[in-house]
Image (cartoon, rainbow, N blue to C red):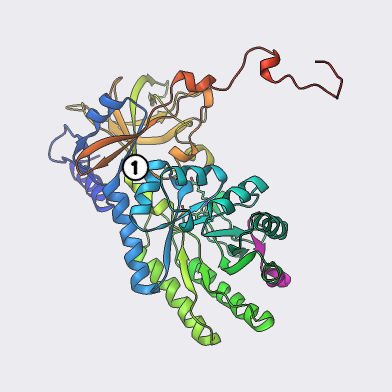
Amino acid sequence: MSYIQKNLFFFSLRKRGLAMAVNPMCDHNRLFIDGIDAVELAKRYGTPLYVYSEDEMIAKMREYTSAVRAYAGDGQVVYASKAYLNMRMARLVAEEGLWMDVASGGELHIALAGGFPAENVVFHGNNKTVEELDMAVRAGVGRIVVDSLDEILMLEAVAKARKRVQAVVLRVTPGIDPHTHEYLTTGEIDSKFGIALHEDRGIQAAYQISLCPHLDFKGIHCHIGSQIFEVDPFVMAADIMMEFISALWRTTGIAVEELNLGGGLGVSYTDEEEIPVSDYIRVMSQEVQAKASEFGLRVPRMFVEPGRSIVAQAGVTLYTVGMVKELPGGELVVSVDGGMSDNPRPMLYGAKYQALLCDGQKGRALCRVRIVGKHCEEGDTLIKEICLPEPRTGDILAVLVTGAYHYSMSSNYNGALRPAVVHVRDGRAYLVVERQTLADLVRGQRATLDDESDGYAKAAGGQS
Ligand code: LLP
């Protein structure tokens, strides 16, 4: 990489708001995350380490809120917590006045434990259990997004038993291909999520909800997919949803107060061209308004559910470089102390990343390297090819744009300990999630088959 390219690279990092300052004027670069030296963080908290800039997440949440205020009046931003959630994040989202999408009883528990107000929770999932529905109704969640005919009946029974009337939204699939990875596509009619709009199925489902005395039908929801870089699929979704709202009104007299258009805005990990948040919100709300006036309907309250675009660029993962190997062809394979257990995205979606060495590269030649993890899988590669100052054992390597779907998708594969999470705010670092310990790996396990391990007998009177 030439000096100019190097400069451009660092410039593009800053332009994308990664909240990092790298001194491009010398070859002894240091990485700062909101003013804090990444190497110091790695020393203090160990690696692998997820580091988040709170200022960056707050800025994104505010960008969404002001775009929604500007273009969608009484609209509401709902943070999709599957992208990144812990008690601290729940508190931050609450402070910013966003609502929160949870996709399981587990996420609901974390949100409530962090002090998130239940009435601002939107509860999702294609297979919520009776226990999860009961937990949500009891907690008083703001909306439950019903996903199937079975669930309508199940939820009615749960709400009835709790003597509550639960506000619900119906998830439908508008049948759109958003041009993203097939695993990230959720709005086509063969999706496992929601009810297809085909053959009046959506109308029948909404009608069925309207017949349930313990369900209060508020509106409809769709989520066409994730990591989308074109506005057209979003506009098409808004269009189809408005057509559905109109058809529902004409055939049943059921009015839709709320239209939740899901999340999905794409984020640049390397050099993808992003759609600005305000353009994304503007085109969708203009479409909703235009269609409402065309059909003579009231403009529904618009909800959006961004996850990735709020947190992805606020996060980096710090690793320590371990073994460095030169392969027969001359390729350098650089191993770090994490891998697919803290970032499964390269293996799942072929995701690409940028990385940089945080310190210690003074006077070193640039070379092409492969960054691999420490897991027992040949495919455990974080970055297939990247140009870096020759990495050496003990260096700290930062993989960028790891704020979304990393911590939340991390695992204990190969007995890996889930990394600690640090938030940086106003130039100070705070530990918000402790690193797991070896004791966590065996918590709840038993090595013996004694009575204490709940020896379950085959039948009444069976072996005891
Ligand atoms: N709303 C619903 C109902 C969703 O299912 C999702 C994401 C979102 C909102 C937020 O979408 P976002 O703004 O983050 O694109 N694990 C994958 C991403 C899966 C997305 C699942 N649903 C990844 O690592 O790329």
Read off the residue under disc 1. 315
**Left or right: 145 with respect to 120?**
right
Residue that sits furthest to the left in the current view:
25
Q: Between residues 16 and 247, which one lies in front from this camera angle?
A: 247
Range covered by the magenta-colored residues: 193-204
**Residue 371, image x and y in percent?**
39, 30
**Residue 3, image x and y in percent?**
18, 41
The residue lying at 48 percent from left, 34 percent from top is 410
Quadrant of residue 27 within the rendered picture: top left
- As for residue 334 lying within the magenta part, the answer is no
The residue lying at 63 percent from left, 77 percent from top is 254
Could you tell me which quadrant the C terminus lies in?
top right
Secondary element type, mark 1: strand
Is residue 412 shown above or below 98?
above
The answer to whether residue 271 shows anywhere in this view is no
Q: Between residues 357 and 279, which one lies in front from this camera angle?
A: 279
**Residue 235, image x and y in percent?**
49, 71
Given the image, on which type of amino acid does mark 1 rest?
Answer: Gly
**Residue 12, image x and y in percent?**
26, 50
Q: Between residues 236 and 315, which one lies in front from this camera angle?
A: 315
- As for residue 202 lying within the magenta part, the answer is yes
**Left or right: 180 with respect to 33?**
right
Total marks shown come to: 1
